Amino acid sequence: MLIAIFLIVKPAVFGSFNIYASILGGQSAVVMLTLALIVPLTAGEFDLSAAAMLAFSAMIIAVLNVDLDVPVGLAVLAALAVSIVVGVLNALLVIRLGIGSLITTLGMATLLQGVVRWISGSRTIYGISDSLVSAVLTGRIFGIAPSFYYTLILCMALWYVFTRTPFGMKLLFVGRGPEVARLNGVAVDRVRMGALISSSFIAALGGVIYAGTSGAADPVSGFSLLLPAFAGAFLGSTAITPGRFNPWGSLFGMYFLATGITGLVTIGAPSFVQDLFYGGALIVAIATVQVLRRWREKRARA
């Protein structure tokens, strides 16, 4: 319906396949960030440091590859290795010290933001190796950049984990009731740790895509992706498998939001409308999830 509205308003733009190819390829990093968030969300945890990890990953690649002349493949591996360390630190603070994930990951996000500014000198670093840019943007299939297909592969992998593996089942079990899960023999702390480490790692993958999309890394813009990613995650939980965070719903939810923002920009809406759109979508999605949850509980008691 959203596309139909924009087709009526701007038929020349939304009647062309190029706009959809641009949306699908251009939003891959934030879609990966959305997929990163749903892993801990399913386990009942929050990771507010995921967007900071994405930005940190991109900056590590830029600093190593451009400033220190490290081969881009090694720079990518270094960024992914650091993401695991960050995920472990988050998990230890949450699980061993009992600090809430909301506070822990908010603090970690602020810390990472400072580190990004420090190692970059608060400057945008251009000139990341063409081999990474080529892997992300060139060799289009059906006119769509490879970054979109990486996102699809990740989405399929997460769908498999969520629906076909013991870890995925335990994530859901822990998210619905950690004490009940513990009494049934589930290693709750291990599941929570796995969720937080996975979130950090997937966010870093988003940072790789982010760096490859622009061929650069900046110390600011990556942090602004957190709100759209949360909006996509909660909106996605109202689709495909209503009331449950799921990869395909998150994928469609994020691209729905991206299409809406692109359409609003195309018709000349002022810049603040983007915040209104994302914030409104997040509120509506959370409200819908709560209604669905209460309906399910009421139905289960009946």
Image (spheres, helix red, strand yellow):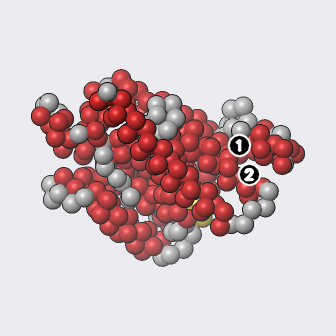
Q: Is 10 displayed left or right of 156 in the figure?
A: right
Residue 198 appears left or right of 121? left
Residue occupying the point 61% across, 48% down: 257
Q: Could you tell me which residue is drawn at 74 percent across and 51 percent down?
A: 263
- What residue does disc 1 label? 2
The Cα–Cα distance between marks 2 and 1, rounded to whole angstroms, is 9 Å
Q: Are marks 2 and 1 in contact (CB under 8 Å)?
A: yes
Does residue 241 show up? yes
Tag 2: amino acid: Gly
Residue 75 position (above or below residue 294): below
Residue 58 in view of the camera: no
In the rendered image, residue 236, in percent from the top left (x then y), is placed at 50, 40
The residue most toward the top is 164
Q: Quadrant of residue 43?
A: top left
- Could you tell me residue 110's position as x and y percent? 38, 69
Q: What x and y, as percent, mark residue 235? A: 52, 44
Mark 1 residue element: helix
Quadrant assignment, res 168: top left
Quadrant of the image containing the N terminus: top right
Q: Earlier in the sequence, mark 2 or mark 1?
A: 1
Q: Residue at x 71, y 43 (%)?
A: 2
Classify mark 2: helix, strand or loop: helix
**Left or right: 294 as drawn, with respect to 153:** left
Q: Check disc 2 and report the residue beneath it.
A: 263
Q: Identify which amino acid the numbered label 1 is placed on.
A: Leu
Image quarter (top left, top right, bottom left or bottom right) of the C terminus: top left
Location of residue 290 by image quarter: top left
With respect to residue 263, does 248 lie above or below?
above
Which residue is at the front of the view, 162 or 65? 162
Numbered-mark total:
2
Q: In the rendered structure, find residue 264 and report the number of the disc placed on it.
A: none
Q: Position of residue 126 (x, y in %)?
A: 60, 64
